[in-house]
Image (cartoon, rainbow, N blue to C red):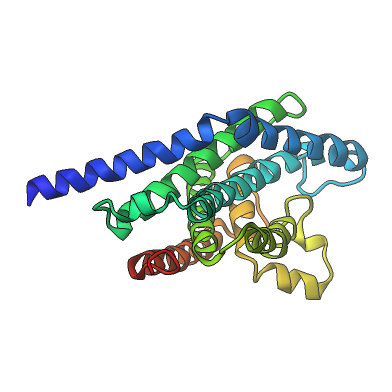
Amino acid sequence: MTQVSTSRLAGTQTLLYKEVLRFWKVAFQTVAAPVLTAVLYLLIFGHVLSNRVQVFEGVGYTSFLIPGLVMMSVLQNAFANSSSSLIQSKITGNLVFLLVAPLSHWAWFIAYVGAAVVRGLAVGLGVMLVTLWFAPLRAAEPWWIVVFALLGAGMLGSLGLIAGLWAEKFDQMAAFQNFIIMPMTFLSGVFYSVHSLPAFWLGVSHLNPFFYMIDGFRRGFFGVSDVSPWVSLGVVGVSFAVVAGIALNLLRIGYKIRH
């Protein structure tokens, strides 16, 4: 029993290492390019709105914008990593080598989502380090920064796993990202406070779990937020549990990967 458990653990570690190495070998594309994109957002929106918008008292708009861009980068890249890895393996046919290996659905989940979390956090850290040149930031409640970054990356990594299992071609994956992930990300308060929205859209925003990830993450920097961080933690925690449970069940039954 101990030998089997050790073998499975080694297999999980090997697959995780392979998934991390997959994106790290092309870090200029998978890490540096998203950092540059976030900086461009900061330059454009910060320049246009810096003297016109103030969301929290004593917090400049550029400072307000940075945590949103960091979290947006974390979420988008965590999703992109697990979804692109799985769909590429399915289309190229090399997924068969994983199917014949003695790996449980938990091993797949830990490896794919773990690598997604690593990439998401790496890009988020890169965005933060570069954007600190443009505006000062403080960590008023740093534990919220860590909690929401990990939960957000884990949830989007799990969602990317679901998308990768469901999609059978790159067009379907692009549709999933363009019509679900991108709108939910951009309508989550990255560039504005949701309290500036009309009542209807404010209500819609509160149905978006991405809003709670970003609002809770921003709370860690400024000590203020649109909603209580405990409410955000509850929503994000439940959302992560649901998405992770679905991903694990799809892996367990071999959805669209075992014929």
Residue found farthest to the bottom: 200
Residue found at x 43% / y 49%? 94
Q: Is residue 138 visible?
A: no
Relative to 129, is 193 on the left or the right?
right
Q: Nearer the viewer, residue 45 or 183?
A: 183
Q: Nearer the viewer, residue 149 or 153?
A: 153
Q: Quadrant of the C terminus?
A: bottom left
Relative to 248, is 209 on the left or the right?
right
Residue found farthest to the front: 93
- Residue 121 image point, x, y percent: 53, 39
Residue found farthest to the top: 133
Total numbered labels? 0
Q: Nearer the viewer, residue 138 or 126?
A: 126
- Residue 101 image point, x, y percent: 27, 51
- Residue 191 image point, x, y percent: 78, 50
Relative to 167, is 150 on the left or the right?
left
- Residue 93 image point, x, y percent: 46, 53
Q: Is residue 255 visible?
A: yes
Residue found at x 45% / y 33%? 21
Instruction: Say above or below: 59 vs 130.
Output: below
Instruction: Say above or below: 256 vs 154.
Output: below
